[in-house]
Image (spheres, rainbow, N blue to C red):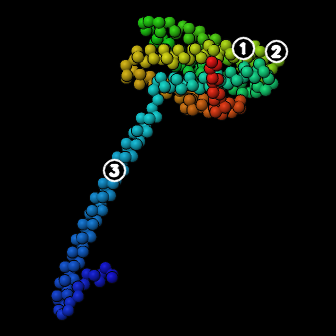
């Protein structure tokens, strides 16, 4: 039945005037019901809009908070990139001692350049040597003595990078250069493994504890500014992509291949 038809009641007998009065009342009732339904729907829509807006703002705020990187997290994830560079150096040293011709000199040179730009010129010079080391020198206790040793190791690492670039960029990693280069890479790996481990567990912790929460948060913001000044963009993202590309060239990208075998059973 059409909408307008249900508004007209059946009159077994009656006048046109009675019919008109009933029709007018029915129309007014229908209009009132329509208004109420419209008001109800508008209220529901407004309420849903408020809920969605609140959810959007909450999720946006949560996402912003999750993306915030603290100063020590920044330092240690940068160490992660440099440790991956050390693994490339380690694999290169193995090849130099076994099959020198199988080592792509280009990949070794790329690793050294990444260590220089991201590790030495940015991470070490701009963050550790200008901000962290001066601060820990002022602290009481054994941690204050770390700065001079760590600085010396930075300098020695730069000597290693110069050496790698000289040899690798010439393309002559085989022959008489193979054994000395392999030995130098292994020495550097051992030094830097101890170096980064002490920084992560002792130096960075002592530095953080010496700061107020406000100053620590400001340091994290300052690190981000320096990173963008040096690279013009996200330096960590750039370095992560570069080391991943080098790992792929060296055949090191599949982490599963490094899963160790089950240790042997003890002999009784």
Rendered residue at 49%/27% (across/down): 224
Labelled disc at residue 183: 1
Rendered residue at 45%/17% (across/down): 205
In the rendered image, residue 257, in percent from the top left (x then y), is placed at: 66, 31
Pointer 2 local density, CA inside 10 Å: few below 14, some 14–19, many at least 20? few
Q: Tell me the SS state at disc 2.
A: helix
Left or right of residue 96, residue 19 in this image: left
Spatial CA span between label 3 and label 1: 64 Å
Q: Nearer the viewer, mark 1 or mark 2?
A: 1
Labelled disc at residue 81: none
Assign the C terminus to one quadrant of the image.
top right
Assign the N terminus to one quadrant of the image.
bottom left
Spatial CA span between label 3 and label 2: 72 Å
Labelled disc at residue 51: 3
Q: Is residue 174 above or below residue 28?
A: above
In the rendered image, residue 14, in percent from the top left (x then y), is placed at: 17, 92
Residue to which mark 2 is pinned? 176
Which image quadrant is residue 159 in? top right
Spatial CA span between label 1 and label 2: 12 Å
Rendered residue at 52%/16% (across/down): 199
Which image quadrant is residue 157 in? top right
Q: Outermost residue toward the front?
A: 268
- Nearest the viewer among 135 and 44 is 44
- Nearest the viewer among 255 and 199 is 255
Left or right of residue 36, residue 45 in this image: right
- Nearest the viewer among 35 and 201 is 201
Pointer 3 local density, CA inside 10 Å: few below 14, some 14–19, many at least 20? few
In the rendered image, residue 53, in percent from the top left (x then y), is placed at: 36, 48
């Amino acid at each position: 039945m059409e909408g307008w038809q249900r508004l007209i009641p059946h009159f077994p007998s009656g006048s046109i005037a009675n019919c008109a009065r009933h029709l007018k009342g029915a129309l007014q009732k229908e209009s009132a019901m329509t208004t109420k339904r419209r008001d109800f729907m508008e209220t529901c829509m407004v309420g849903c809009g408020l809920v969605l807006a609140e959810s959007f703002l909450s999720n946006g705020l949560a996402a912003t908070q999750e993306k915030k990187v603290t100063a020590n997290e920044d330092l240690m994830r940068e160490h992660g990139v440099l440790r991956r560079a050390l693994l490339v150096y380690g694999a290169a040293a193995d090849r130099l001692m076994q099959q020198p011709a199988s080592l792509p000199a280009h990949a070794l040179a790329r690793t050294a350049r990444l260590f220089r730009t991201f590790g030495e010129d940015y991470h070490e010079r701009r963050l550790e040597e200008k901000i962290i080391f001066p601060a820990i020198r002022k602290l009481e206790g054994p941690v204050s003595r770390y700065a001079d040793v760590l600085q010396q190791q930075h300098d020695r690492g730069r000597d290693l990078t110069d050496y790698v670039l000289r040899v690798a960029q010439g393309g002559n990693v085989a022959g008489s250069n193979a054994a000395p280069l392999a030995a130098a890479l292994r020495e550097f790996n051992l030094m830097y493994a101890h170096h980064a481990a002490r920084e992560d567990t002792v130096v960075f912790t002592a530095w953080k504890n010496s700061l107020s929460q406000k100053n620590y948060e400001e340091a994290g913001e300052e690190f981000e500014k320096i990173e963008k000044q040096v690279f013009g963009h996200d330096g960590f993202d750039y370095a992560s992509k570069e080391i991943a590309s080098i790992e792929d060239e060296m055949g090191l990208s599949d982490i599963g291949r490094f899963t160790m075998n089950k240790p042997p059973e003890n002999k009784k």
